[in-house]
Image: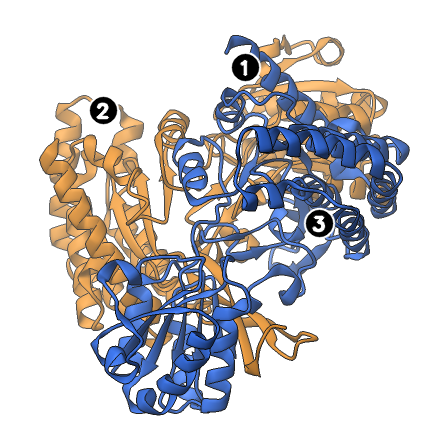
Chain colours: A blue, B orange
């Protein structure tokens, strides 16, 4: 434990020192590093796959389930997409140093803002080794230093990817310590990482809800956290029913296990009889289990009764809760009570109701006539995302490069003093 | 202790409920409430001064020092300026609901951002009762609910101001619980307030460094904190020496006890002999004690030797540290080592050096040819400020209305689904 503390303090100090150099690195140098890392990953495919094979073998010995092994496994294809992701980050605009809002004040000074990196970003994640490359790339492009702590089951894969990252940084003339991957699987390292405000400016945990809740509760450093996604689609009685069916189908069935998938469907009673039987047949044909309130069960006989717990559950599975509501007011009240404030969508042709939904639903993404599945950094045009924040402080919703930066004030004078 | 917990949970629940209504209140209603509160303060001057007299008498009994009693004391004049401050907040633009950056994406959806309140803001402050009105006004205008915890020595004053705030809210048709002033002086109430993430979205502590450090360390809620201001002025060897003397004089002597006052003066060795004797005579004439490094002491014989500790000290007093540095590099290295990242200024006519200073100094306000005393919400055009953040997350530097808001994503579609 004492040794872990010393080790982490050293990592922290190195990251802090590297962050000063990264903050000043120019765009061309950072892009070169990203391109170098991508090249190193493609060049060292054999070593990366061999390291990953060790992790996969250990995972099989430890009887991890198939889904976990699937997330852990690297392939030629996943390595290519890792490299492509880094090249894509290189094409994104560099936000660092951007000066905005420079305005004259009555005193004669000009006051504006300059975008700057946060400093040192700690990222704690579970099995997917591709996060090592993604997170390194995003932190690098935004001028930050990163301390990465991956899952213990991916330690060999992560160290092999780290070697490529270091090679790319070195060849570009940047410090290797700009991206450090913690080399121990000791859990005490996480405890240290989240309690070193002198070295770490923000923690981004990526993983299951319990991991994130624990980190948020124990951290002494700001946390950009992504808790659950209990997302809603509300079909208003002035909805275009074709759009409604298309959106509600897509929001649930396009992918089941992700955070922006709809978990509860709300339908205005005025259109429930017209829309639910047809829509639910689509769900049933795709093997989705339906759990509804009394009114919904009356309309669809294959529906099971929902309990209070269903409204609060992120299924991440082919299960859907369905509730018939009186009107927009009841829909908003339901959402503001049960939603996890991730993503909620209304289907309506009525402008006033659409604007009310946008304003009154307190979620990180609020949509009109679109599938909740669009809540994603790529779809929003942020490039890649480091996570989706369910917090309101600093960054809310998908967090791209901008979420890894801050703004300082700059003042340009010509000798002004305060009187 | 059990009772305090119940009491604070009730305050928290009421604030959360009120925050939903405040988020939807329109600009006219919020401005009417601000005007009502200002009117109530002016109308109830006699009651406010009587309540304040009780606090002042108790403070004298408890042998508080004159500076503390001065901060505590309300006068006809300070009540008028409290009312004026509220009317000024009413004239600021309402940021809530503002939609920006709405752009079409290749999928056909339009993605943008809408500015929204943070929700519930907890403010913990020390003796000045005017913070009660200022903080209430800023939270109200930004559509938040506030929980205010003032100093125990100001309890009668704060409750009397709270009565005016409640009257103003009520008359405007807004919930009185939008601004709650904690009625107990029990310290356990603070412990509860900073550990209720379910009810409180952010804590803003205003007061001494030790109070703020303790709150930041114990909070389970994000904290916008303002620690110390160890501010620097660097006089470059390409400075206009008239500007340099004017700025360095003003930055130190215009007011001693505030956070944006210069605590350390750095002078390039090329101009030290030309500028220091003349400038230091001004300081000595104003009674400022000087503590310098060896080179500075050689140039000004009334200077005492500075110790390592001096470079790290926020004097808040007529004391100044002075160091002669080789060049811009040494100045930036000194600042990034010893500065508290609050406000630092360079005096130079050289454009390249000015731009390097702006980019490389990692402080919340970085200035060229202007006095550090300008680091202030009013001077920056933010209107009032709730504090000056020395953090990088969420808000950095003076925090006005915008710092009390967040942005959610909005998506406008016409039936799009993800493929």
Q: Would residue B182 be visible to someone looking at this image?
A: no
In this picture, residue B380 sits left or right of residue B168: right
Residue A206, position in %: x, y?
54, 43
The answer to the question of whether label 1 and label 2 lie on touching residues, with beta carbons closer than 8 A, is no
Residue B245, position in %: x, y?
70, 33
Which residue is label 1 attached to? A5
Displayed quadrant of residue B368: top right
Discs 1 and 2 share one subunit: no
C-alpha gap between disc 1 and disc 3 = 43 Å
Image mark for residue A412: 3
Disc 2 element: loop
**Dot in front, 1 or 3:** 1
Crowding around mark 1 (Cα neighbors within 10 Å: few <14, some 14 to 19, many 20+) is some
Disc 3 element: strand
Q: In the image, what residue occupies the spot 81% across and 56% down?
A: A91
In this picture, residue A248 sits left or right of residue B107: left
Between B159 and A330, the residue placed more toward the observer is A330
The answer to the question of whether label 3 and label 2 lie on touching residues, with beta carbons closer than 8 A, is no
The answer to the question of whether label 1 and label 3 lie on touching residues, with beta carbons closer than 8 A, is no
Instruction: Output the chain of dot 1.
Output: A
Mark toward the start of the polypeptide (1 vs 3): 1
**Dot in front, 1 or 2:** 1
C-alpha gap between disc 3 and disc 2 = 42 Å
Instruction: Output the chain of dot 3.
Output: A
Displayed quadrant of residue A120: top right
Which residue is label 2 attached to? B64
Displayed quadrant of residue B1: top left
Q: In the image, what residue occupies the spot 13% across and 42% down?
A: B6
Residue B189, position in %: x, y?
20, 36
In this picture, residue A227 sits left or right of residue B196: right
């Amino acid at each position: 434990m004492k040794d872990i503390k010393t080790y982490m303090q050293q990592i922290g100090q190195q990251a802090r020192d590297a962050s000063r150099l990264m903050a000043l690195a120019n765009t061309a140098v950072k892009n070169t590093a990203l391109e170098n890392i991508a090249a190193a990953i493609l060049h060292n495919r054999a070593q990366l796959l061999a390291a990953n094979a060790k992790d996969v073998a250990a995972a099989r010995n430890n009887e991890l389930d198939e889904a976990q092994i699937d997330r852990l496994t690297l392939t030629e294809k996943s390595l290519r997409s890792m490299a492509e992701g880094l090249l894509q980050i290189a094409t994104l605009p560099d936000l660092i140093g951007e000066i905005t809002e420079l305005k004259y004040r009555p005193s004669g000074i000009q006051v504006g803002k300059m975008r700057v990196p946060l400093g040192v970003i700690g990222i704690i994640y579970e099995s997917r080794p591709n996060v090592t490359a993604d997170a390194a790339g995003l932190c690098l492009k935004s001028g930050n230093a990163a301390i990465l702590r991956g899952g213990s089951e991916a330690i060999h894969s992560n160290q092999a990817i780290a070697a490529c990252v270091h090679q790319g940084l070195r060849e570009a003339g940047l410090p290797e310590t700009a991206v450090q991957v913690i080399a121990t699987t000791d859990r005490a390292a996480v405890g240290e990482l989240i309690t070193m405000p002198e070295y770490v400016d923000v923690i981004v945990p990526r993983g299951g809800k319990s991991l994130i809740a624990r980190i948020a509760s124990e951290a002494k450093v700001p946390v950009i956290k992504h808790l659950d996604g209990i997302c809603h689609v509300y079909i208003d009685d002035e909805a275009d029913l074709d759009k409604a069916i298309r959106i509600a189908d897509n929001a649930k069935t396009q992918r089941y296990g992700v955070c922006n998938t709809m978990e509860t469907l709300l339908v205005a009673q005025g259109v429930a009889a017209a829309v639910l039987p047809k829509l639910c047949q689509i769900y049933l044909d795709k093997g989705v289990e339906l759990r509804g309130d009394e009114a919904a069960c009356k309309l669809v006989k294959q529906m099971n009764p929902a309990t209070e717990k269903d409204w609060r559950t992120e299924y991440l599975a082919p299960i859907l809760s369905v509730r018939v509501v009186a009107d927009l007011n009841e829909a908003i009240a339901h959402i503001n009570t049960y939603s996890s404030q991730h993503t909620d969508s209304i289907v309506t042709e009525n402008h006033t109701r659409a604007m009310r939904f946008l304003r009154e639903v307190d979620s990180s993404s609020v949509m009109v006539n679109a599938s909740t599945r669009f809540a994603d950094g790529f779809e929003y045009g942020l490039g890649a995302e480091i996570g989706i924040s369910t917090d309101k402080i600093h960054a809310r919703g998908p967090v791209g490069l901008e979420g890894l930066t801050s703004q300082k004030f700059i003042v340009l004078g010509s000798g002004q003093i305060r009187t």
